[in-house]
Image (cartoon, grey):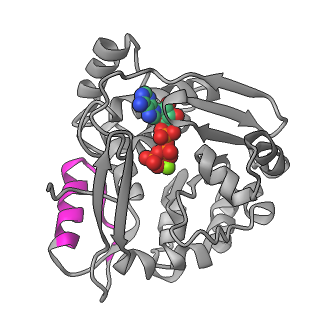
Amino acid sequence: MTVTLGSSTAIFAANAASLESRVCFVGMIGRDPFGALVRTSLEARGVDTRYLVEGDVPTGASICMSYGEDRAVLTYQGAMDVMGLGDINPEVFEETKHIHLSSIFMQSGVLRDLEKILDLAAAKGITVSLDTQWDPVEKWSFDYNRLLPKITVFMPNEKELRCLTGKDDLESAIAEVRPYLGFAMMLKCGSKGSVLIMKDGSRTNLPAFLNKDVVDAIGAGDSCNAGFVSAFVKGLPLRECQRTGNLTGAVNTTAAGGTGAFASLEAVRKVCLNRFGQEINL
Ligand SMILES: Nc1ncnc2c1ncn2[C@@H]1O[C@H](COP(=O)(O)OP(=O)(O)OP(=O)(O)O)[C@@H](O)[C@H]1O
Ligand SMILES: [Mg+2]
């Protein structure tokens, strides 16, 4: 068993920082060893932790059992479930140009305040990306009619999109959310790659950069998000953001856990070139 930095948002933050985006992590930890691990691991990657809040609840933790490209995760939510808009320093909305949200069903405080957070971001001209991730209680209470128009890039995977919309058929699920998209949807399809869908319905399918030697797929989605968003905040064209996302998702599968393959941009560059014959334009 390895004790390491986890959670969708922390993996995203650590890997986006390794890709040399300037990242600040806004989240809640407890005053305990796991909280210290989160702080030091993020700082080791160059993530700004000044808006990390210490609450009176223990730090969330997961036991992650990995089986090839699938896995089972048992999570104690702890502090991550408590943080709401009231715990977020308002300076955040003055300083950032992009906010990435993830695992909203694991964070009931964030889910409760989501619309207010999105409105504050919009008022400041901040772009937003959101990955719902899986809902462990499978209620899928995400009012996409109201919320999606306020989200610049929506980043679910296929299964999550089908569950959110209650449509078994993927095309029907896409058709259901498409009119509400704020700008675009990066739909993640595992080893099949991704589909970029624009609000006007145009789309780009991009096959995965296939890795025949998958170590594990823990965090592939978050690493894909980190690549996509790092390219997006640099102002690269959306198709290049998609290619970068597919590439960093693939890179993720070459090492253990969610952050193993992302020691530095140089290390990622080498894996992209040697394993996938691709340049990464970050
Ligand atoms: N086995 C693989 N080989 C190459 N690329 C992969 C593989 N698995 C995933 N990827 C790439 O990573 C991207 C994101 O992975 P995936 O679709 O699994 O996201 P996800 O379901 O959100 O993942 P997670 O369960 O980590 O949240 C995919 O679109 C694909 O481009
Ligand atoms: Mg995911």
Q: Residue at 35%, 51% (x, y): give it.
A: 11
Can the viewer see residue 118?
A: yes
Which stretch appears magenta? Answer: 34-53
Question: Percent x, y for residue 146?
Answer: 79, 65
Based on the displayed image, in which of its 4 quarters is residue 174 positioned? Answer: top right
Q: Residue at 29%, 58% (x, y): give it.
A: 64
Question: Percent x, y for residue 262?
Answer: 27, 36
Can you say which quadrant of the picture contains the C terminus? Answer: top left
> Would you place residue 211 above or below residue 92 in this image?
above
Taking depth in this image into account, of 158 and 17 the one nearest to the observer is 158
> Would you place residue 248 above or below residue 102 in this image?
above
Q: Residue at 27%, 82% (x, y): give it.
A: 58
Q: List the single residue furthest toward the top.
A: 277
Question: Percent x, y for residue 242?
Answer: 57, 29
> Would you place residue 98 above or below residue 240 in this image?
below
Can you say which quadrant of the picture contains the N terminus? Answer: bottom left
Taking depth in this image into account, of 82 and 69 the one nearest to the observer is 69
Q: Residue at 23%, 40% (x, y): give it.
A: 256
* Residue 50 colored in magenta in the image: yes
